[in-house]
Amino acid sequence: MRAPALYTAAGSLLLTTLAAAPAGGVPGTPGDALQLGGTAIAAARAEAKGITFGACPDAEDMPAALQCGTVSVPLDYAHPDGKQIRLTVSRVRATHKDPHNSKRLVPRQGALVFNPGGPGGSGLYFPLAGLLPEWKRIGAAYDLVGYEPRGVGRSAPLSCRDPQQFFKAPSQSPTHPSESYKKERIAEAKAYAADCAQRAGSVLKHYTSLNNARDLDVLRAALGEPRLTFMGASYGTYFGSLYATLFPSHVRRMVFDAPVNPDPEQIWYRNNLDQSAAFEARWADFREWVAKHDTVYGLGDTAEKVQRSYEKVRAGLAAEPAGGTVGPGQLQGAFLSAGYYDDFWPHRAQALSAYLKGDPKPLIQQAGPHPEAAAEAENTSAVYTAVECNDAAWPTDWKVWDRDNTRLARVAPFETWDNVWMNLPCAYWPAARQEPLDVRTGPGELPPALILAAERDAAAPYEGALEMHRRLSGSVLVTERDAGTHGIAGGPNSCVNGHLDAYLLEGELPARRAACAPHPEPSPSR
Protein backbone atom coordinates (compact mmCIF):
# COMPACT_ATOMS: atom_id res chain seq x y z
CA MET A 1 0.00 0.00 0.00
CA ARG A 2 1.33 3.40 -0.93
CA ALA A 3 1.77 6.28 1.46
CA PRO A 4 -1.22 8.64 1.60
CA ALA A 5 1.26 11.39 0.81
CA LEU A 6 4.53 10.43 -0.82
CA TYR A 7 6.58 12.20 1.77
CA THR A 8 9.95 11.01 2.96
CA ALA A 9 12.55 12.73 5.07
CA ALA A 10 14.30 13.64 1.83
CA GLY A 11 11.35 15.67 0.62
CA SER A 12 9.25 16.49 3.65
CA LEU A 13 9.53 20.26 3.38
CA LEU A 14 9.06 20.19 -0.36
CA LEU A 15 5.78 18.33 -0.43
CA THR A 16 3.99 20.28 2.06
CA THR A 17 4.84 17.44 -1.69
CA LEU A 18 25.16 -4.75 -19.99
CA ALA A 19 24.07 -6.77 -17.16
CA ALA A 20 25.55 -9.81 -15.54
CA ALA A 21 22.07 -11.14 -14.82
CA PRO A 22 19.12 -11.66 -17.17
CA ALA A 23 16.62 -8.83 -17.43
CA GLY A 24 13.30 -10.57 -16.80
CA GLY A 25 11.29 -12.25 -14.12
CA VAL A 26 12.18 -15.84 -15.08
CA PRO A 27 15.94 -16.10 -15.66
CA GLY A 28 17.13 -17.50 -18.94
CA THR A 29 14.03 -17.26 -21.11
CA PRO A 30 14.17 -15.87 -24.67
CA GLY A 31 12.02 -12.94 -23.54
CA ASP A 32 14.65 -12.01 -20.97
CA ALA A 33 17.34 -11.85 -23.64
CA LEU A 34 15.13 -9.59 -25.76
CA GLN A 35 14.48 -7.22 -22.88
CA LEU A 36 18.15 -7.19 -21.92
CA GLY A 37 19.13 -6.35 -25.47
CA GLY A 38 16.38 -3.78 -25.72
CA THR A 39 17.63 -2.05 -22.59
CA ALA A 40 21.16 -1.90 -23.99
CA ILE A 41 19.88 -0.42 -27.27
CA ALA A 42 17.76 2.18 -25.49
CA ALA A 43 20.59 3.11 -23.13
CA ALA A 44 23.04 3.57 -26.02
CA ARG A 45 20.56 5.85 -27.79
CA ALA A 46 19.98 7.86 -24.61
CA GLU A 47 23.70 8.22 -23.97
CA ALA A 48 24.24 9.58 -27.47
CA LYS A 49 21.34 12.04 -27.21
CA GLY A 50 21.63 13.10 -23.59
CA ILE A 51 19.03 15.32 -21.92
CA THR A 52 18.42 18.94 -22.86
CA PHE A 53 17.53 20.74 -19.65
CA GLY A 54 15.52 23.96 -19.54
CA ALA A 55 12.72 25.59 -17.57
CA CYS A 56 10.36 23.20 -15.80
CA PRO A 57 6.68 23.24 -16.82
CA ASP A 58 4.37 24.88 -14.29
CA ALA A 59 7.34 25.82 -12.13
CA GLU A 60 6.95 29.61 -12.05
CA ASP A 61 7.32 29.67 -8.27
CA MET A 62 10.33 27.35 -8.22
CA PRO A 63 13.97 28.41 -8.02
CA ALA A 64 15.60 28.95 -11.41
CA ALA A 65 18.22 26.34 -10.50
CA LEU A 66 15.57 23.63 -10.96
CA GLN A 67 15.62 22.55 -14.59
CA CYS A 68 13.70 19.88 -16.48
CA GLY A 69 14.09 17.74 -19.57
CA THR A 70 12.90 14.44 -20.97
CA VAL A 71 14.37 11.05 -21.83
CA SER A 72 12.76 8.55 -24.20
CA VAL A 73 12.37 4.91 -23.20
CA PRO A 74 10.69 2.01 -25.01
CA LEU A 75 7.19 1.17 -23.87
CA ASP A 76 8.19 -2.48 -24.40
CA TYR A 77 11.87 -3.36 -24.03
CA ALA A 78 11.37 -6.46 -26.14
CA HIS A 79 10.70 -4.03 -29.01
CA PRO A 80 13.12 -1.14 -28.43
CA ASP A 81 12.37 0.40 -31.84
CA GLY A 82 8.63 0.39 -31.20
CA LYS A 83 6.52 2.89 -29.31
CA GLN A 84 8.53 5.30 -27.14
CA ILE A 85 7.39 7.19 -24.05
CA ARG A 86 8.99 10.27 -22.53
CA LEU A 87 9.95 10.49 -18.86
CA THR A 88 10.15 13.96 -17.32
CA VAL A 89 13.45 14.52 -15.49
CA SER A 90 14.49 17.35 -13.15
CA ARG A 91 17.90 18.49 -11.98
CA VAL A 92 19.70 20.98 -9.78
CA ARG A 93 23.40 21.07 -10.56
CA ALA A 94 25.99 20.51 -7.87
CA THR A 95 26.69 23.80 -6.11
CA HIS A 96 30.35 23.00 -5.31
CA LYS A 97 29.86 25.10 -2.13
CA ASP A 98 31.02 23.62 1.15
CA PRO A 99 28.37 24.74 3.71
CA HIS A 100 31.03 24.65 6.46
CA ASN A 101 33.82 26.42 4.55
CA SER A 102 32.84 29.04 1.97
CA LYS A 103 36.38 29.15 0.57
CA ARG A 104 36.49 25.44 -0.25
CA LEU A 105 35.41 24.27 -3.71
CA VAL A 106 33.74 20.85 -3.54
CA PRO A 107 34.50 18.56 -6.51
CA ARG A 108 31.51 17.14 -8.39
CA GLN A 109 30.91 13.40 -7.95
CA GLY A 110 28.20 12.95 -10.58
CA ALA A 111 24.42 12.70 -10.46
CA LEU A 112 22.40 11.37 -7.53
CA VAL A 113 19.07 10.02 -8.80
CA PHE A 114 16.18 9.74 -6.34
CA ASN A 115 12.84 7.94 -6.31
CA PRO A 116 10.38 8.57 -3.44
CA GLY A 117 8.38 5.36 -3.73
CA GLY A 118 4.76 4.56 -4.39
CA PRO A 119 4.43 2.99 -6.88
CA GLY A 120 3.14 6.21 -8.40
CA GLY A 121 5.28 8.77 -6.59
CA SER A 122 6.91 11.67 -8.41
CA GLY A 123 10.44 12.71 -7.54
CA LEU A 124 10.27 15.79 -9.76
CA TYR A 125 10.86 18.27 -6.93
CA PHE A 126 13.43 16.22 -5.05
CA PRO A 127 16.36 18.31 -6.34
CA LEU A 128 15.09 21.19 -4.19
CA ALA A 129 16.10 19.12 -1.16
CA GLY A 130 19.53 20.64 -1.72
CA LEU A 131 18.15 23.82 -0.16
CA LEU A 132 17.69 22.05 3.17
CA PRO A 133 20.56 22.17 5.68
CA GLU A 134 20.74 18.37 5.93
CA TRP A 135 21.32 18.08 2.17
CA LYS A 136 23.70 20.96 1.44
CA ARG A 137 26.86 18.84 1.64
CA ILE A 138 25.41 16.25 -0.72
CA GLY A 139 24.03 18.98 -2.99
CA ALA A 140 27.51 20.49 -3.19
CA ALA A 141 29.00 17.29 -4.60
CA TYR A 142 26.15 15.89 -6.68
CA ASP A 143 23.73 17.00 -9.33
CA LEU A 144 20.44 16.16 -7.59
CA VAL A 145 18.14 14.43 -10.08
CA GLY A 146 14.48 13.53 -9.74
CA TYR A 147 12.02 12.20 -12.28
CA GLU A 148 8.48 11.04 -12.89
CA PRO A 149 8.50 7.27 -13.56
CA ARG A 150 6.48 5.82 -16.41
CA GLY A 151 2.79 6.49 -15.93
CA VAL A 152 3.33 9.29 -13.41
CA GLY A 153 2.55 12.96 -14.02
CA ARG A 154 3.70 13.91 -17.51
CA SER A 155 5.54 10.63 -18.13
CA ALA A 156 2.99 8.81 -20.32
CA PRO A 157 0.34 9.36 -17.61
CA LEU A 158 -1.87 6.45 -16.69
CA SER A 159 -5.50 6.91 -15.70
CA CYS A 160 -8.12 4.39 -14.66
CA ARG A 161 -11.03 6.70 -13.86
CA ASP A 162 -12.31 10.20 -14.43
CA PRO A 163 -10.54 12.25 -11.73
CA GLN A 164 -13.77 14.11 -10.97
CA GLN A 165 -15.25 10.78 -9.87
CA PHE A 166 -12.20 9.69 -7.89
CA PHE A 167 -12.93 11.23 -4.49
CA LYS A 168 -15.95 9.79 -2.73
CA ALA A 169 -16.68 11.72 0.42
CA PRO A 170 -17.91 11.15 2.99
CA SER A 171 -17.22 7.42 3.13
CA GLN A 172 -17.26 4.61 5.64
CA SER A 173 -14.31 2.62 6.98
CA PRO A 174 -15.55 -0.31 9.07
CA THR A 175 -12.88 -2.23 10.95
CA HIS A 176 -15.04 -5.37 10.79
CA PRO A 177 -17.12 -4.98 7.62
CA SER A 178 -20.47 -6.67 7.08
CA GLU A 179 -21.06 -9.13 4.27
CA SER A 180 -23.14 -6.56 2.41
CA TYR A 181 -20.34 -3.98 2.68
CA LYS A 182 -17.81 -6.53 1.41
CA LYS A 183 -20.01 -7.21 -1.63
CA GLU A 184 -20.12 -3.49 -2.39
CA ARG A 185 -16.35 -3.22 -2.26
CA ILE A 186 -15.85 -6.35 -4.36
CA ALA A 187 -18.05 -4.82 -7.04
CA GLU A 188 -16.05 -1.59 -6.86
CA ALA A 189 -12.76 -3.47 -7.21
CA LYS A 190 -14.01 -5.37 -10.25
CA ALA A 191 -15.24 -2.14 -11.84
CA TYR A 192 -11.94 -0.37 -11.17
CA ALA A 193 -9.91 -3.19 -12.73
CA ALA A 194 -12.18 -3.14 -15.77
CA ASP A 195 -11.89 0.65 -16.04
CA CYS A 196 -8.10 0.41 -16.00
CA ALA A 197 -8.15 -2.09 -18.84
CA GLN A 198 -10.61 -0.04 -20.86
CA ARG A 199 -8.84 3.31 -20.47
CA ALA A 200 -5.26 2.04 -20.84
CA GLY A 201 -5.79 -0.73 -23.37
CA SER A 202 -2.83 -2.84 -24.46
CA VAL A 203 -0.23 -0.60 -22.78
CA LEU A 204 -1.47 -1.51 -19.29
CA LYS A 205 0.80 -4.54 -18.98
CA HIS A 206 3.95 -2.46 -19.47
CA TYR A 207 3.67 -0.63 -16.13
CA THR A 208 5.88 -2.88 -14.01
CA SER A 209 8.71 -2.69 -11.51
CA LEU A 210 11.04 -4.45 -13.92
CA ASN A 211 10.38 -1.78 -16.54
CA ASN A 212 10.96 0.88 -13.89
CA ALA A 213 14.37 -0.68 -13.28
CA ARG A 214 15.12 -0.77 -17.00
CA ASP A 215 14.02 2.85 -17.36
CA LEU A 216 16.45 3.73 -14.60
CA ASP A 217 19.35 2.36 -16.63
CA VAL A 218 18.31 4.40 -19.65
CA LEU A 219 18.13 7.50 -17.43
CA ARG A 220 21.62 6.73 -16.10
CA ALA A 221 22.96 6.62 -19.64
CA ALA A 222 21.11 9.80 -20.67
CA LEU A 223 22.71 11.64 -17.74
CA GLY A 224 26.13 10.56 -18.99
CA GLU A 225 26.83 8.48 -15.90
CA PRO A 226 28.90 5.34 -16.52
CA ARG A 227 27.72 4.04 -13.14
CA LEU A 228 24.58 4.94 -11.21
CA THR A 229 24.39 6.65 -7.83
CA PHE A 230 20.81 6.11 -6.65
CA MET A 231 18.67 6.62 -3.60
CA GLY A 232 15.29 4.92 -3.37
CA ALA A 233 12.76 5.31 -0.57
CA SER A 234 10.03 2.79 0.22
CA TYR A 235 8.89 1.22 -3.09
CA GLY A 236 11.90 2.90 -4.69
CA THR A 237 14.04 0.42 -2.76
CA TYR A 238 12.28 -2.47 -4.46
CA PHE A 239 12.90 -1.54 -8.06
CA GLY A 240 16.29 -0.21 -6.96
CA SER A 241 17.09 -3.73 -5.75
CA LEU A 242 15.84 -5.09 -9.08
CA TYR A 243 18.28 -2.71 -10.77
CA ALA A 244 21.10 -3.92 -8.52
CA THR A 245 20.30 -7.52 -9.48
CA LEU A 246 19.95 -6.81 -13.20
CA PHE A 247 22.77 -4.29 -13.66
CA PRO A 248 25.28 -4.74 -10.82
CA SER A 249 28.20 -3.56 -12.95
CA HIS A 250 26.36 -0.29 -13.62
CA VAL A 251 26.16 0.62 -9.92
CA ARG A 252 28.41 3.15 -8.19
CA ARG A 253 26.56 3.69 -4.90
CA MET A 254 23.01 2.85 -3.80
CA VAL A 255 21.01 3.94 -0.76
CA PHE A 256 17.91 1.97 0.22
CA ASP A 257 15.81 4.03 2.64
CA ALA A 258 12.84 2.26 4.32
CA PRO A 259 13.21 -0.97 2.31
CA VAL A 260 10.27 -3.12 1.37
CA ASN A 261 10.76 -6.87 1.59
CA PRO A 262 12.08 -8.01 -1.84
CA ASP A 263 11.48 -11.75 -1.28
CA PRO A 264 9.56 -12.91 -4.39
CA GLU A 265 7.11 -14.75 -2.13
CA GLN A 266 6.22 -11.41 -0.50
CA ILE A 267 5.46 -9.47 -3.70
CA TRP A 268 2.89 -8.02 -3.13
CA TYR A 269 0.06 -9.79 -1.32
CA ARG A 270 2.03 -10.96 1.71
CA ASN A 271 3.85 -7.64 2.03
CA ASN A 272 0.49 -5.95 2.41
CA LEU A 273 -0.58 -8.37 5.14
CA ASP A 274 2.66 -7.67 7.02
CA GLN A 275 2.14 -3.95 6.57
CA SER A 276 -1.35 -4.05 8.06
CA ALA A 277 -0.01 -5.87 11.10
CA ALA A 278 2.80 -3.33 11.51
CA PHE A 279 0.42 -0.38 11.36
CA GLU A 280 -1.35 -1.69 14.43
CA ALA A 281 1.85 -1.38 16.46
CA ARG A 282 2.52 2.10 15.12
CA TRP A 283 -1.06 3.16 15.87
CA ALA A 284 -0.40 2.07 19.45
CA ASP A 285 2.76 4.22 19.51
CA PHE A 286 0.71 7.25 18.51
CA ARG A 287 -1.97 6.61 21.13
CA GLU A 288 0.63 6.17 23.85
CA TRP A 289 2.21 9.49 22.87
CA VAL A 290 -1.18 11.22 23.00
CA ALA A 291 -1.87 9.68 26.42
CA LYS A 292 1.48 10.96 27.67
CA HIS A 293 0.29 14.47 26.78
CA ASP A 294 -3.22 14.19 28.17
CA THR A 295 -2.87 17.55 29.90
CA VAL A 296 -2.58 19.12 26.42
CA TYR A 297 -5.16 17.15 24.47
CA GLY A 298 -7.56 15.71 27.04
CA LEU A 299 -8.08 12.55 25.01
CA GLY A 300 -7.22 10.12 27.81
CA ASP A 301 -4.22 9.27 29.93
CA THR A 302 -3.89 5.72 28.60
CA ALA A 303 -3.70 4.34 25.06
CA GLU A 304 -7.01 2.56 25.65
CA LYS A 305 -8.74 5.81 26.62
CA VAL A 306 -7.32 7.55 23.56
CA GLN A 307 -8.75 4.73 21.45
CA ARG A 308 -12.16 5.34 22.99
CA SER A 309 -11.89 9.04 22.16
CA TYR A 310 -11.02 8.13 18.58
CA GLU A 311 -13.99 5.76 18.37
CA LYS A 312 -16.24 8.50 19.72
CA VAL A 313 -15.10 10.80 16.91
CA ARG A 314 -15.58 8.02 14.37
CA ALA A 315 -19.14 7.41 15.57
CA GLY A 316 -19.92 11.12 15.45
CA LEU A 317 -18.68 11.39 11.88
CA ALA A 318 -20.66 8.32 10.83
CA ALA A 319 -23.81 9.96 12.15
CA GLU A 320 -23.04 13.43 10.79
CA PRO A 321 -20.00 13.95 8.52
CA ALA A 322 -17.99 17.04 9.41
CA GLY A 323 -18.45 19.74 6.83
CA GLY A 324 -20.50 17.28 4.83
CA THR A 325 -17.32 15.60 3.53
CA VAL A 326 -15.39 14.08 6.44
CA GLY A 327 -16.72 10.69 7.46
CA PRO A 328 -15.01 7.67 9.01
CA GLY A 329 -13.15 6.95 5.78
CA GLN A 330 -11.59 10.40 5.66
CA LEU A 331 -10.78 10.18 9.38
CA GLN A 332 -8.99 6.90 8.77
CA GLY A 333 -7.00 8.34 5.88
CA ALA A 334 -5.83 11.29 7.94
CA PHE A 335 -4.75 9.18 10.87
CA LEU A 336 -3.05 6.63 8.64
CA SER A 337 -0.55 9.38 7.83
CA ALA A 338 0.26 9.53 11.56
CA GLY A 339 1.41 5.94 11.18
CA TYR A 340 3.90 7.05 8.54
CA TYR A 341 5.29 10.23 10.08
CA ASP A 342 5.35 11.20 13.72
CA ASP A 343 5.59 14.90 12.92
CA PHE A 344 1.86 14.62 12.11
CA TRP A 345 1.10 13.50 15.66
CA PRO A 346 0.55 16.93 17.29
CA HIS A 347 -1.74 18.15 14.50
CA ARG A 348 -3.85 15.00 14.42
CA ALA A 349 -4.21 14.90 18.21
CA GLN A 350 -5.18 18.58 18.27
CA ALA A 351 -7.84 17.98 15.59
CA LEU A 352 -9.39 15.13 17.60
CA SER A 353 -9.37 17.23 20.73
CA ALA A 354 -10.98 20.21 19.00
CA TYR A 355 -13.70 18.07 17.44
CA LEU A 356 -14.69 16.61 20.80
CA LYS A 357 -14.86 20.17 22.16
CA GLY A 358 -17.24 21.19 19.40
CA ASP A 359 -14.85 22.59 16.80
CA PRO A 360 -14.67 20.40 13.66
CA LYS A 361 -12.64 22.88 11.57
CA PRO A 362 -9.14 21.43 12.23
CA LEU A 363 -10.38 17.94 11.37
CA ILE A 364 -12.08 19.16 8.20
CA GLN A 365 -8.88 20.94 7.20
CA GLN A 366 -6.69 17.88 7.82
CA ALA A 367 -9.00 15.08 6.63
CA GLY A 368 -11.25 16.68 4.02
CA PRO A 369 -10.79 15.87 0.34
CA HIS A 370 -9.09 18.44 -1.87
CA PRO A 371 -10.80 18.45 -5.29
CA GLU A 372 -7.93 20.43 -6.81
CA ALA A 373 -5.68 17.43 -6.17
CA ALA A 374 -8.06 14.88 -7.70
CA ALA A 375 -6.18 14.43 -10.98
CA GLU A 376 -2.86 13.83 -9.26
CA ALA A 377 -4.43 11.47 -6.71
CA GLU A 378 -6.21 9.48 -9.41
CA ASN A 379 -3.02 9.18 -11.45
CA THR A 380 -1.04 8.05 -8.41
CA SER A 381 -3.67 5.43 -7.59
CA ALA A 382 -3.76 4.15 -11.17
CA VAL A 383 0.03 3.70 -11.35
CA TYR A 384 0.15 2.11 -7.91
CA THR A 385 -2.53 -0.40 -8.85
CA ALA A 386 -1.15 -1.23 -12.28
CA VAL A 387 2.42 -1.82 -11.09
CA GLU A 388 1.51 -3.93 -8.07
CA CYS A 389 -1.10 -5.95 -9.96
CA ASN A 390 1.23 -6.55 -12.92
CA ASP A 391 4.28 -7.44 -10.83
CA ALA A 392 3.16 -10.77 -9.40
CA ALA A 393 0.34 -13.25 -8.92
CA TRP A 394 -2.40 -12.29 -6.45
CA PRO A 395 -5.11 -14.55 -4.99
CA THR A 396 -8.04 -14.59 -7.38
CA ASP A 397 -10.41 -16.28 -4.94
CA TRP A 398 -12.15 -13.80 -2.63
CA LYS A 399 -12.35 -16.48 0.03
CA VAL A 400 -8.56 -16.29 0.45
CA TRP A 401 -8.62 -12.52 0.99
CA ASP A 402 -11.60 -12.82 3.33
CA ARG A 403 -10.04 -15.59 5.40
CA ASP A 404 -6.60 -13.97 5.74
CA ASN A 405 -7.83 -10.49 6.54
CA THR A 406 -10.70 -11.47 8.82
CA ARG A 407 -8.14 -13.35 10.88
CA LEU A 408 -5.68 -10.44 10.80
CA ALA A 409 -8.30 -7.81 11.65
CA ARG A 410 -8.98 -9.55 14.97
CA VAL A 411 -5.55 -8.45 16.18
CA ALA A 412 -4.83 -5.54 13.79
CA PRO A 413 -8.10 -3.74 13.06
CA PHE A 414 -6.71 -0.25 12.44
CA GLU A 415 -5.66 -0.61 8.79
CA THR A 416 -6.35 -4.18 7.67
CA TRP A 417 -9.57 -3.79 5.69
CA ASP A 418 -8.72 -0.43 4.14
CA ASN A 419 -5.54 -2.05 2.87
CA VAL A 420 -7.65 -4.81 1.34
CA TRP A 421 -9.87 -2.39 -0.55
CA MET A 422 -6.82 -0.54 -1.86
CA ASN A 423 -5.39 -3.70 -3.40
CA LEU A 424 -8.46 -5.81 -4.23
CA PRO A 425 -8.54 -4.80 -7.94
CA CYS A 426 -5.50 -7.08 -8.27
CA ALA A 427 -7.78 -10.09 -7.66
CA TYR A 428 -9.64 -9.24 -10.86
CA TRP A 429 -6.80 -7.77 -12.90
CA PRO A 430 -7.10 -8.38 -16.67
CA ALA A 431 -3.43 -8.06 -17.67
CA ALA A 432 -0.90 -10.89 -17.56
CA ARG A 433 1.11 -11.17 -14.34
CA GLN A 434 4.88 -11.33 -14.14
CA GLU A 435 6.95 -13.60 -11.97
CA PRO A 436 8.98 -11.53 -9.50
CA LEU A 437 12.72 -11.47 -10.00
CA ASP A 438 14.77 -13.17 -7.29
CA VAL A 439 16.65 -10.19 -5.87
CA ARG A 440 20.10 -11.44 -4.97
CA THR A 441 23.75 -10.53 -5.52
CA GLY A 442 26.81 -12.58 -4.70
CA PRO A 443 30.06 -11.50 -3.04
CA GLY A 444 31.84 -8.86 -5.09
CA GLU A 445 29.10 -8.54 -7.72
CA LEU A 446 27.73 -5.26 -6.37
CA PRO A 447 29.48 -2.31 -4.71
CA PRO A 448 28.52 -2.12 -1.03
CA ALA A 449 25.08 -0.56 -0.60
CA LEU A 450 23.75 1.44 2.36
CA ILE A 451 20.41 0.35 3.84
CA LEU A 452 18.58 2.70 6.23
CA ALA A 453 15.61 1.60 8.30
CA ALA A 454 13.54 2.67 11.28
CA GLU A 455 12.88 -0.23 13.61
CA ARG A 456 9.14 0.50 13.99
CA ASP A 457 8.38 1.59 10.42
CA ALA A 458 4.84 0.42 9.64
CA ALA A 459 4.70 1.10 5.90
CA ALA A 460 7.93 -0.87 5.37
CA PRO A 461 8.20 -3.33 8.28
CA TYR A 462 11.73 -3.85 9.57
CA GLU A 463 11.91 -7.44 8.40
CA GLY A 464 12.10 -6.05 4.87
CA ALA A 465 15.33 -4.23 5.71
CA LEU A 466 16.80 -7.41 7.17
CA GLU A 467 15.80 -9.36 4.07
CA MET A 468 17.27 -6.73 1.73
CA HIS A 469 20.47 -6.81 3.78
CA ARG A 470 20.66 -10.61 3.48
CA ARG A 471 20.09 -10.57 -0.26
CA LEU A 472 22.50 -7.80 -1.27
CA SER A 473 25.94 -9.16 -0.50
CA GLY A 474 28.26 -6.63 1.12
CA SER A 475 25.46 -4.24 2.07
CA VAL A 476 25.44 -2.38 5.39
CA LEU A 477 22.31 -1.83 7.50
CA VAL A 478 21.91 1.28 9.66
CA THR A 479 18.93 1.07 12.02
CA GLU A 480 17.20 3.91 13.83
CA ARG A 481 16.15 2.16 17.02
CA ASP A 482 12.71 2.60 18.62
CA ALA A 483 11.54 4.93 15.83
CA GLY A 484 8.97 4.52 13.10
CA THR A 485 9.22 7.36 10.59
CA HIS A 486 8.88 6.06 7.03
CA GLY A 487 12.07 7.27 5.35
CA ILE A 488 14.90 8.54 7.55
CA ALA A 489 17.54 9.87 5.13
CA GLY A 490 18.06 13.59 5.45
CA GLY A 491 15.67 13.80 8.39
CA PRO A 492 16.13 14.93 12.00
CA ASN A 493 18.52 12.16 13.08
CA SER A 494 22.10 13.44 12.87
CA CYS A 495 23.51 9.94 13.38
CA VAL A 496 21.64 8.60 10.35
CA ASN A 497 22.64 11.64 8.30
CA GLY A 498 26.26 11.19 9.30
CA HIS A 499 26.27 7.68 7.85
CA LEU A 500 24.50 8.93 4.71
CA ASP A 501 27.01 11.74 4.16
CA ALA A 502 30.01 9.50 4.83
CA TYR A 503 28.76 6.97 2.28
CA LEU A 504 27.72 9.33 -0.51
CA LEU A 505 30.60 11.78 -0.08
CA GLU A 506 33.50 9.53 0.95
CA GLY A 507 32.34 6.01 0.09
CA GLU A 508 32.75 5.10 3.77
CA LEU A 509 30.51 2.59 5.53
CA PRO A 510 30.29 1.39 9.13
CA ALA A 511 30.52 -2.25 10.10
CA ARG A 512 28.02 -4.68 8.62
CA ARG A 513 25.35 -3.28 10.92
CA ALA A 514 25.12 -0.07 12.92
CA ALA A 515 22.49 1.52 15.13
CA CYS A 516 21.40 5.07 15.87
CA ALA A 517 19.38 6.27 18.84
CA PRO A 518 15.89 7.50 17.91
CA HIS A 519 15.24 11.10 16.96
CA PRO A 520 13.32 13.08 19.60
CA GLU A 521 9.57 12.58 19.81
CA PRO A 522 7.49 15.51 18.55
CA SER A 523 6.51 18.18 21.02
CA PRO A 524 2.78 18.58 21.70
CA SER A 525 1.01 21.61 20.30
CA ARG A 526 -2.08 23.29 21.70
Image (spheres, helix red, strand yellow):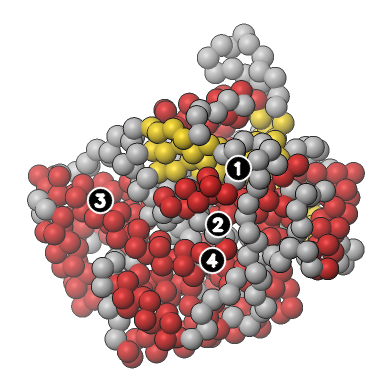
The residue beneath circle 1 is 473
* C-alpha separation, residue under disc 4 versus residue under disc 1: 20 Å
Check the picture and name the quadrant holding the C terminus.
Answer: top left
* C-alpha separation, residue under disc 4 versus residue under disc 3: 29 Å
Tell us which disc is closer to us: 3 or 2. 2
Crowdedness near tag 3: few (<14), some (14–19) or many (≥20) residues, C-alpha within 10 Å:
some
The residue beneath circle 2 is 262
* C-alpha separation, residue under disc 3 versus residue under disc 1: 33 Å
Secondary element at image label 3:
helix
Question: Along the horizontal axis of the image, is 367 left or right of 112?
Answer: left
Residue at image position (63%, 59%) is 438
Q: Nearer the viewer, residue 309 or 451?
A: 451
Give the quarter of the image for residue 194: bottom right
The disc label shown at residue 285, or none: 3
Crowdedness near tag 4: few (<14), some (14–19) or many (≥20) residues, C-alpha within 10 Å:
some
The disc label shown at residue 265, or none: 4
The first of marks 3 and 1 along the sequence is: 3
